[in-house]
Amino acid sequence: MSIGKKIRYKLEWVGLAWLYFSIPLLPRRLAHGMSRLLGSLAFLADKRGRTTALENLALIFGDEKEAKEIEEFKD
């Protein structure tokens, strides 16, 4: 494994450990807002995952929903 991946995985672990312990201490509204923000950032940062998610939604809904409606799920 490359040194870059080791550093990345360690940073991800530290971030998740911090969230694991800090989220229960926050007010519900703040925790909810943070989760929406972090989810939106992850959605924007992960192009391959975003494409897969939108394709899966298109498969699930088929003719039931238009592409524009499916795109609205990302908000």
Image (cartoon, helix red, strand yellow):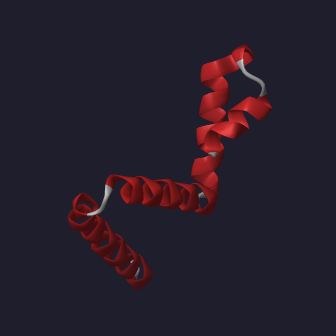
- Identify whether 51 is placed above or below 6: above
Quarter of the image where one finds residue 43? bottom right
Q: Quadrant of the image for the N terminus?
A: bottom left
User: Which residue is most to the top?
Assistant: 64
Residue 36 on image: x %, y %: 50, 53
Which percent across, then down, holds residue 44? 63, 59
Judged from this view, the residue extending furthest toward the bottom is: 3
Left or right, residue 26 beside residue 47: left
Number of numbered labels in the structure image: 0
Q: Is residue 24 above or below residue 68?
A: below
Whether residue 25 sits left or right of residue 54 in the image: it is: left
Q: Residue at x 73, y 30 (%)?
A: 69
Relative placement, left or right, of 68 versus 7 is right
Q: Residue at 52% across / 60% down in the picture?
A: 37
* Location of residue 22 with respect to 59 vertically, above or below: below
- Along the line of sight, which residue is nearer the eye, 5 or 59? 59
Q: State the image coordinates of residue 3 (x, y, percent, origin top left).
A: 39, 84
Q: Quadrant of residue 34?
A: bottom left
Residue 55 position, x and y percent, is 66, 35
Residue 41 placement: quadrant: bottom right
At 28% across and 75% down in the image, what residue appears?
14
Using residue 48 as the reference point, say whether residue 25 is left or right of it.
left
**Viewer-proximal residue among 29 and 20:** 29
